[in-house]
Amino acid sequence: MAAFLSAGDAAIRTVRARVIRAPGNDRNAGSLPGFDTSRTSTKSVQRFNPAGQPCQQVAQQAPRILGRELENHSSRIGLAKPARCATRAERPGFSVRHHAVPAAAALSALGTAEPLAGIDAEGRATQLQYIHPMRTLYVSVAIGVIVLSAVSASAQVKGGEDETGSYDAVEGWPQPWSKPGYIWGSQPAVFAQSPDRIFIGMRGELKAPEPAPRGFNGSWGSTGQRATEPKAELRNSIVVVDRAGKLLEAWTQWDRLFEGSGPHKIRISPYDPQKHVWVVNDGKHQIHKFTNDGKQLVMTLGEAGVAGDDATHFGMPQDVAFLPDGSILVADGLRNARIAKFDRDGKFVSSFGTRGSGPGQLSGVHGIAAGKDGRIYVADRSNRRIQVFDANGTSIDIWPNLRQPNDIFISDDGTVWVVDGTNARLLQFDKNGKRLYFWGTYGMQPGQFWEPHQISIDSEGSLYIADSFGGRTQKYVPSKSGDRTRLLIPVK
């Protein structure tokens, strides 16, 4: 089993294969042409089976790489596959193909995110062993320009669980602000306006457990019970903290608006120079717009306590997004199954979506984000998918097989991040729905989460995750040794 080798953050990966001479099989020795990621051509070299078995027999003897059938995966990762049936003169054997693909793509093609002996999770250099009854083939995967014998001890990665991806969790953030004898309740909402102005939405405060149970770390989720279960005292429903997590503002004057529910999500339009604060009040079927300092309630959409499916009512709205012209998109949500559009002044314009599981239909709409290209991404949660719409509300793509999509963030690099509440992870997709990466671990230790509900990024790249069931919001900063392609990039 080859050791894992760290080669740094090389951007170009080159794969090279060679056949090692086996005793009595000299004609199979020699170098095979490798491939460079800068080229797209495919090269192949025919290697014959000295025993001359028929193709079917050779296929039945297909060797394994780390316990995985080579014949099942090789055509996808470009390592090797049984050759076509050849003429007697050609003699049947194996065709070794080399494709210009990154090592990480080869790992992905194997259908696993777990590091394999020979290819680590970063796609770094190692060695695979292909054992054939008549000869041995070694495939060496080299990343960038590397001399294996010269890898220093400082470049090697030892230990660790990689629980927080390319980030480091900031322990002890934020600082406590609850009333003495109380701790935070459920925290479903967070929005970072800047590194020194972070909004947190909370469903009240909970009386601290007495005596504190084993493993209690100050957040209700560490008691083993969801922070949404105990009855909370609605206090400090919206607060603002700085980069150190120190309380700057507590909008207690608006606690009365959220009695019985609490805020669900918080947003600020990137197109609003005044930076008004929008707060989704799902329990009251309303959405509120405040001045940035919280002193004035500028607008309210929906009627308090009255559910409906028309121009002036919502049915438990879950999220809002914004368009460049100032239009507002409402994910309306748990009782309803639609996206409602309003103009910048709050006048109803149109809606799209009906209840169901077909294209264009929605169920349990929980999150929404609008891209620069005009695409509208919807967390169609009860259908366990992301559904993509054009600006006219026509369904143009569906990304299925998710567990519980709670929130969506469109990174400035064009990738789309989806927050999965049940699996407690963040998933990175390209704009066509191909999964690129994910990270996250269930738990209540620093950096872990129970039900990540909303995420936000500040201009310095720090990540904030509101954990509804855990009863806390955590801050993460980019790790100095992390992969930069696996970071959420703030929109400029």
Image (cartoon, rainbow, N blue to C red):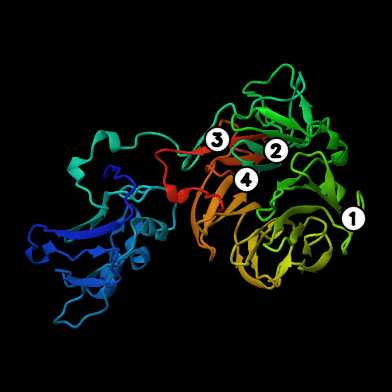
Residue type for callout 1: Ala
Residue type for callout 4: Ile
Residue type for callout 3: Gly
Left or right: residue 297 versus residue 15 is right
Q: Earlier in the sequence, mark 4 or mark 3?
A: 3
Label 1 or label 4, whichever lies nearer to me, is 4
Label 4 or label 3, whichever lies nearer to me, is 4
Left or right: residue 310 versus residue 319 is right
Left or right: residue 309 versus residue 167 is right
Secondary element type, mark 4: strand
Secondary element type, mark 1: loop
Residue 402 image-quadrant placement: bottom right
Q: Nearer the viewer, residue 247 or 483?
A: 247
Q: Earlier in the sequence, mark 3 or mark 1?
A: 1
* Label 4, label 3: how far apart the Cα atoms are: 14 Å
* Label 2, label 1: how far apart the Cα atoms are: 26 Å
Q: Residue at x 67, y 62 (%)?
A: 324
Q: x and y percent of residue 58 in the render?
A: 25, 69
Disc number at residue 447? 3
Q: Can residue 102 be seen in the rendering of this structure?
A: yes
- Residue under label 1: 307
Disc number at residue 455? 4
Q: Residue at x 32, y 62 (%)?
A: 70
- Residue under label 2: 200
Residue type for callout 2: Ile
* Label 2, label 3: how far apart the Cα atoms are: 17 Å
Q: Earlier in the sequence, mark 1 or mark 4?
A: 1
Mark 1 Cα shell of 10 Å, populated few (<14), some (14-19), many (≥20):
many
Q: x and y percent of residue 63 in the render?
A: 28, 60
